[in-house]
Image (spheres, grey):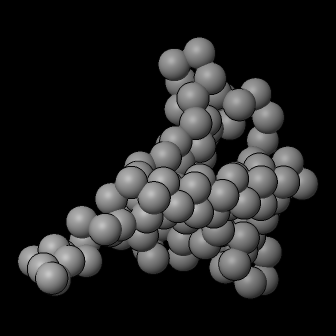
Amino acid sequence: MQPFVPRAKLWLESEGRLVMSDYRLRLLQLIGESGSLAAAAAAMGLSYRRAWGKIKELEANLGYPLVRSEVGGAGGGHTALTPEGQALLAAYARFRDRVEAAVRQAFDDELGSLTRGPSPSA
C-alpha cells in the first residue's frame, strides 16, 4: 500500500457567511504579488468578473475593504491590498500553517504506524 497523507479543507465563517478560504487567500496573494486583479484572475483561471465578485463578497462579509483599485493611467489600472487586506492575508496564512502542522502531528500520532505497513513478525 502506498503511504497516505492527511488533507484538511479550511475556511472561516462569520454568522454562516464565508470570510476566508484557501482559494480566496490565493486570489489575494496573487493580487498582492501582481498588483492586478485581472492578472490574478487569469492565473487562477477565473473571469475578471468572477474574481471581482469573490473579493466583493469577502469585503461585504467582513465589513471592510481588502483591495484598492485605481483605474486608467498610462500603465493601465492597478489593484493593491489595503492594510486590512494585507493583515488578514498574513494572519490567515499563519493560521493555516499552524492548523496544517497540528493535523500532520495528530495524523502521525494516531495513524502514522498504519501508513508504514505491518511490522515484521518475529
Residue 100 visible in the current orientation: no
Count of numbered labels shown in the rendering: 0
The residue at the far right in this view is: 83
Q: Judge left or right: residue 28 versus residue 87.
A: left
Q: Quadrant of the C terminus?
A: bottom left
Q: Provide residue 106's location: percent of width, then percent of height.
A: 48, 54
Residue 20 vs 18, above or below: the answer is: below
Q: Which residue is located at x 54 percent, y 71 percent?
A: 40
Q: Provide residue 21's location: percent of width, then percent of height.
A: 53, 48
Q: Which residue is located at x 77 percent, y 54 percent?
A: 91
Quarter of the rendering containing residue 34: bottom right
Q: Which residue is located at x 59 percent, y 15 percent?
A: 15
The residue at the far front in this view is: 122
Q: Which residue is located at x 16 percent, y 74 percent?
A: 118
Residue 112 visible in the current orientation: yes
Residue 35 vs 79, above or below: the answer is: below
Q: Considering depth in this image, is 86 or 51 the residue closer to the camera?
A: 86
Q: Quadrant of the N terminus?
A: bottom left
Q: Provide residue 111's location: percent of width, then percent of height.
A: 33, 59
Quarter of the rendering containing residue 2: bottom left
Q: Judge left or right: residue 37 versus residue 70.
A: left
Q: Judge left or right: residue 34 versus residue 40.
A: right
